[in-house]
């Protein structure tokens, strides 16, 4: 869930790790198109009945693993509903609020494993190796470049998600 820079890298890492099919959910058509170009098996607009589409895509089972790279209370809850019985939810994105309603009973009934991630400790070399080997394409994620003098503009563009930005780079 989420086709921003982290979600799109997660898509590629899942493929590099052997995932045979990957669905990517987002609200932004441009980001979904990028996910498709990077090899997503299916892309789903999160406003268009994502639970039904994931059920159809997985032949009624639900997803084995759901990575929530969006980090909102709504996507955190959606992740549980998209996961199959005995599946796993990996929380990557940070919700802006610490406490919010969560479908815990549903997660328990489905025996869903919920894992959190913070700062990918001890994976730097494997990450560098994936990029160096070409298995992870970071260049596609860079949609905008700015000189150092326009750093504020780059940050505002990214924050507002304007002009189709995925990742804005500041050249130093």
Image: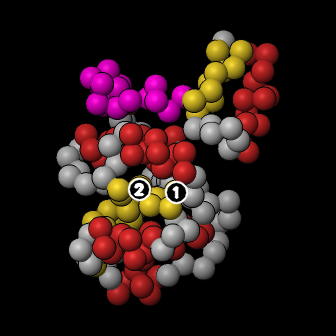
- Is 151 placed left or right of 136 in the picture? right
In the image, is residue 43 above or below residue 119? Answer: below
The quadrant holding residue 23 is: bottom left
The answer to whether residue 44 shows anywhere in this view is: yes
Name the residue located 41 percent from the left edge and 56 percent from the top edge: 43
Name the residue located 73 percent from the left edge and 36 percent from the top edge: 157
Q: Residue 171: where, in percent of width, then height?
A: 64, 15
- Is 66 placed left or right of 49 in the picture? left
In the image, is residue 110 above or below residue 123? Answer: below
Magenta segment main secondary structure: helix
Q: Judge the density around disc 2: few (<14), some (14-19), many (≥20) Cα neighbours within 10 Å.
A: many
Of label 1 and label 2, which has the lower sequence position?
Answer: 1
Q: Nearer the viewer, residue 63 or 88?
A: 63
Q: Nearer the viewer, residue 29 or 126?
A: 29
Q: Residue 22: where, in percent of width, then height?
A: 31, 54
Q: Nearer the viewer, mark 1 or mark 2?
A: 2
- Is 158 placed left or right of 121 in the picture? right
Q: Judge the density around disc 1: few (<14), some (14-19), many (≥20) Cα neighbours within 10 Å.
A: many
Q: Are marks 1 and 2 in contact (CB under 8 Å)?
A: yes
The answer to whether residue 119 shows anywhere in this view is: no
- Is 59 placed left or right of 11 in the picture? left
Name the residue located 35 percent from the left edge and 87 percent from the top edge: 109
**In the image, which disc is placed on residue 26?**
1
Disc 1 is placed on an element classified as strand
Q: Residue 123: where, in percent of width, then height?
A: 35, 35
Q: Residue 62: where, in percent of width, then height?
A: 30, 73
Residue 100 is a magenta residue: no
Q: Which residues are magenta?
A: 125-142
**In the image, which disc is placed on residue 44?**
none
Residue beneath label 2, please? 43
Residue 126 is a magenta residue: yes
- The C terminus sits in image quarter: top right
């Amino acid at each position: 869930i989420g086709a921003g820079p982290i979600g799109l890298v997660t898509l590629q890492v899942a493929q590099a790790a052997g995932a045979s099919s990957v669905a990517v959910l987002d609200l932004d058509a441009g980001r979904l198109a990028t996910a498709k170009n990077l090899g997503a098996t299916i892309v789903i607009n999160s406003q268009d009945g994502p639970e039904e589409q994931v059920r159809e895509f997985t032949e009624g089972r639900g997803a084995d693993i759901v990575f929530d790279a969006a980090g909102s209370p709504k996507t955190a809850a959606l992740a549980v509903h998209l996961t199959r019985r005995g599946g796993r939810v990996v929380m990557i994105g940070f919700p802006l609020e610490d406490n919010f309603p969560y479908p815990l009973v549903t997660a328990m009934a489905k025996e869903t494993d919920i894992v959190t991630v913070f700062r990918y400790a001890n994976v730097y070399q494997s990450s560098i190796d994936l990029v160096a080997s070409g298995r992870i394409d970071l260049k596609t994620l860079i949609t905008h470049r700015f000189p150092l003098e326009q750093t504020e503009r780059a940050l505002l563009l990214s924050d507002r998600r304007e002009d189709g930005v995925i990742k804005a780079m500041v050249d130093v």
